[in-house]
Image: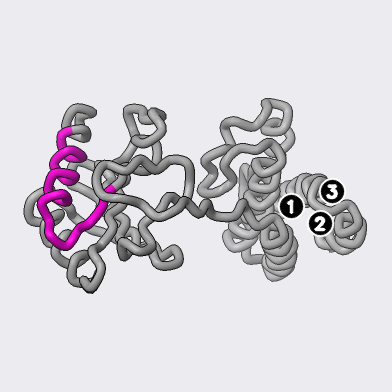
Amino acid sequence: MFAIEARGVLRATLLSQAEADPQIAAAAITGSGASGGEDRWSDIDLAFGVREGVEPAGVIAAWTTRMYEEQGAVHHLDVLAGPWIYRVFLLANTLQVDLAFVTVTEFRALAPTFRVVFGAAQEARYLPGPDTTGMVGWGWLYALHARSSLMRGKWWQAEAMIRGVREQAMALACVRYGVPAAHAKGLDSLPAAELAAFSGALVTSLEAEELWRTLAVALGCLVREFEFVDSDLAKRLEKPLGLLGARH
């Protein structure tokens, strides 16, 4: 398990190495480390602006070697967001280190949690808010597959699809209350009454009766959230979603 002090030392080390790297023109601390919101379990989030004329792939490869050879990385994955490449490392001590790379001409804040350490950033360009229309679509799509899974006797698939319905409804609730909707980050900030309503959509067994029950509850939650997004759309979807939750 990583120590809080070690996390701070590693972040400082990485920033020092970045400043000494002739291929890195700018760096920033992002995430909770930039906002003062870190706790015992926070990871390290850094953003690097690659100098003009330098191929980012080579810089990322060099930093990947450094993370494995010097910092005890055991695996990594890439997350792509526009021109940014986020290489996410898992260290042997369970610390997560996210290193984001972009050419310096695109080095800018995408959210308020962005604190430049050295170099200069372009004008901030915050990402748009959550796509509620997409959440609505995924909600009824999961519901369709939940119904077909139940009718086919595929209980594990049904559980997964019902969970998908519930998660889309809860994400819409997060948007409604102005808390983070992505990666379930805002769920624990929802009011207790809202969470109590959603708790009825938690599957407690793979018995057919229980699965049909939780699907009906999840669909009720979903339709309720649709009303806050678009009341006309909610009216159009209420009948077909009610049919999906009716046991045949």
Q: Is residue 218 above or below residue 155?
A: above
Q: Which residue carries the number 3 mark?
A: 227
Q: Position of residue 241 (x, y in %)?
A: 83, 59
Residue at 15% x, 49% y: name it: 19
Q: State if disc 2 and disc 1 touch (CB < 8 Å).
A: yes
Q: Separation of disc 2 and disc 3 at Cα? A: 18 Å
Q: Secondary structure at mark 2?
A: loop
On the rendered structure, is 53 left or right of 228?
left
Q: Quadrant of the N terminus?
A: top left
- Nearer-N-terminus badge (1/3): 1
Q: Main secondary structure of the magenta part?
A: helix
Q: Separation of disc 1 and disc 3 at Cα? A: 19 Å
- Nearer-N-terminus badge (1/2): 1
Rendered image: mark on residue 78: none
The disc labelled 1 sits on which kind of residue? Leu
On the rendered structure, is 24 left or right of 109?
left
- Nearer-N-terminus badge (2/3): 3
Which residue range is magenta in the image? Answer: 9-27
Q: Secondary structure at mark 3?
A: helix
The disc labelled 3 sits on which kind of residue? Glu
Q: Which residue carries the number 2 mark?
A: 245
